[in-house]
């Protein structure tokens, strides 16, 4: 299993940090995020900040 930490940029209150889990290289588990932007023209992006292997 791998834990993938990522930042969502574009939220009006700053970056949102989330973690997803990749198991057996086929199943990605994550919680959908809802963000608020200052306008419809705001560019939203995601940056992977860390990937770590977890013991089973």
Image (cartoon, grey):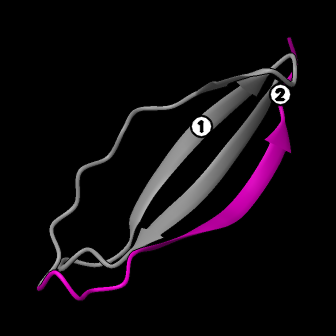
Left or right: 6 as drawn, with respect to 8? right
The boundaries of the magenta stretch are 39-56
The percent coordinates of residue 9 (x first, y second) are 41, 76
Q: Which residue is mark 1?
A: 20
Question: Which residue occupies 82% across, 44% down?
Answer: 52
Give the secondary structure at mark 2: loop
Please report the residue visible at 12 percent of the width from the left and 85 percent of the height from the top.
Answer: 39
Q: Which of pointers 1 and 2 indicates the residue nearer the eye? A: 1
* Mark 1 in CB contact with mark 2 (< 8 angstroms): no
Q: Earlier in the sequence, mark 1 or mark 2?
A: 1
* Horizontal and vertical percent position of residue 12: 18, 80
> Any magenta on residue 52?
yes
Under circle 1, the secondary element is strand
At 45% from the left and 59% from the top, the residue drawn is 17
Q: Quadrant of residue 16?
A: bottom left
Q: Quadrant of residue 14?
A: bottom left
Screen quadrant of the N terminus: top right
Q: Note whether 24 is above or below 5 in the view shown.
A: above
Across and down, in percent, residue 18 comes to: 47, 49
In the picture, the disc for residue 54 is 2
Image quarter where the C terminus lies is: top right
């Amino acid at each position: 299993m791998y834990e993938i930490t990522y930042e969502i940029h574009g939220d009006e209150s700053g970056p949102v940090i989330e973690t997803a889990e990749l198991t057996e290289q086929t199943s990605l588990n994550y919680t959908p995020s809802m963000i608020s932007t200052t306008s419809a023209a705001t560019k939203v992006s995601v940056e992977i900040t860390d990937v770590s292997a977890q013991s089973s």
